Image: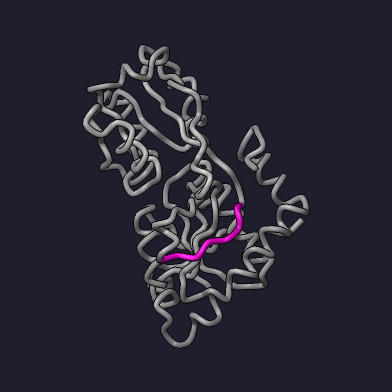
């Protein structure tokens, strides 16, 4: 198994300098985007260290490629923008390769698979159509947001102001929303907590569209040279025990 390095504690100034390519440092260090707050994929543990499945997977990819990397946590919409502009070399945040995103980003092979779920008050569990006219929350600039617009546009009150899953689920807990539409991994983690026992899974999980199926690493178009190495790293991590150990560490089920 690859020996994963500890999270790199780098000052904000150093990160900015490295990711803007000053002094030729960009050639020696890759800037890797990670979602800021998205447990169990990326979060700060009680010891103050950032960890999570995507964090450790990104470290494994960099180590497998023999590259030095700086890991930069950002909200999801900023990851999209900074990968597009080349401020980030690549982003490990479970992105789907939609047709729109393929116009300005490159994508790796799939490294895990997910689906989306509705979570809300138990009274809506027996009939999802009861959400008509209700407040449904979703993270902005996500596939879930696109789906809700096509499914519930004009039929429900769509609330897409949230930049993190934590904000979204907290709004549900505080009664600001009647339901949320989230990635299943974060959603099941929420439902597993005893303090959230008044909420329920409202419908069968929805699989992503076949064309964008699977979660991938997004790569800036200016670094097409990284794609073969990233794909080779994903294959290696899948074949040795790195992936299975990471999966068991953060999930109670197979995520591939």
Say above or below: 247 vs 181: below
Q: Which residues are magenta?
A: 104-110
Image location (x, y in percent) of residue 19 = 43, 74
Count of number-bearing discs: 0
Q: Quadrant of residue 28?
A: bottom right
Check if residue 214 falls in the magenta segment.
no
Q: From the image, which quarter does the N terminus lie in?
A: bottom right
Question: Please, what is the dominant secondary structure of the magenta stretch?
Answer: strand
Q: Nearer the viewer, residue 70 or 186?
A: 186
Taking the spot 42% from the left edge, 52% from the top edge, the residue there is: 36
Image location (x, y in percent) of residue 200 = 44, 19
With 11 as the anchor, is 66 left or right in this view? right
With 245 as the anchor, is 139 left or right in this view? left
With 67 as the anchor, is 194 left or right in this view? left
Taking the spot 54% from the left edge, 58% from the top edge, the residue there is: 217
Say above or below: 134 vs 47: above
Q: Nearer the viewer, residue 5 or 119?
A: 119
Q: Nearer the viewer, residue 251 or 235?
A: 235
- Colour treatment of the image: one colour
Q: From the image, which quarter does the C terminus lie in?
A: top right
């Amino acid at each position: 198994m690859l020996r994963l390095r500890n999270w790199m504690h780098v000052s904000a100034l150093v990160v900015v300098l490295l990711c803007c390519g000053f002094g030729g440092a960009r050639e020696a260090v890759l800037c890797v985007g990670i979602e800021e707050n998205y447990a169990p994929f990326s979060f700060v543990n009680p010891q103050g260290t950032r960890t999570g499945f995507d964090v450790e997977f990104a470290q494994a990819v960099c180590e497998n490629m023999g590259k030095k990397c700086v890991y930069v946590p950002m909200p999801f919409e900023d990851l999209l923008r900074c990968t597009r502009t080349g401020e980030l070399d690549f982003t490990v945040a479970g992105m789907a390769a939609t047709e729109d995103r393929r116009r300005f980003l490159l994508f790796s092979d799939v490294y895990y698979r997910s689906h989306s779920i509705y979570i809300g008050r138990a009274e809506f569990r027996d009939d999802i159509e009861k959400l008509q006219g209700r407040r449904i929350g979703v993270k902005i600039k996500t596939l879930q947001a696109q789906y809700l617009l096509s499914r519930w546009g004009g039929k429900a009150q769509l609330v897409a102001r949230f930049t993190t899953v934590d904000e979204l689920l907290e709004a549900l807990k505080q009664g600001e929303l009647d339901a949320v539409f989230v990635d299943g991994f974060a959603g099941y983690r929420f439902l597993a907590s005893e303090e959230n026992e008044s909420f329920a899974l409202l419908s069968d999980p929805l699989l992503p569209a076949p064309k964008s199926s699977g979660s991938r690493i997004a790569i800036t178009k200016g670094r097409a040279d990284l794609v073969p190495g990233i794909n080779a790293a994903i294959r290696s991590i899948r074949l040795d025990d790195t992936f299975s150990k990471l999966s068991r560490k953060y999930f109670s089920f197979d995520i591939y």
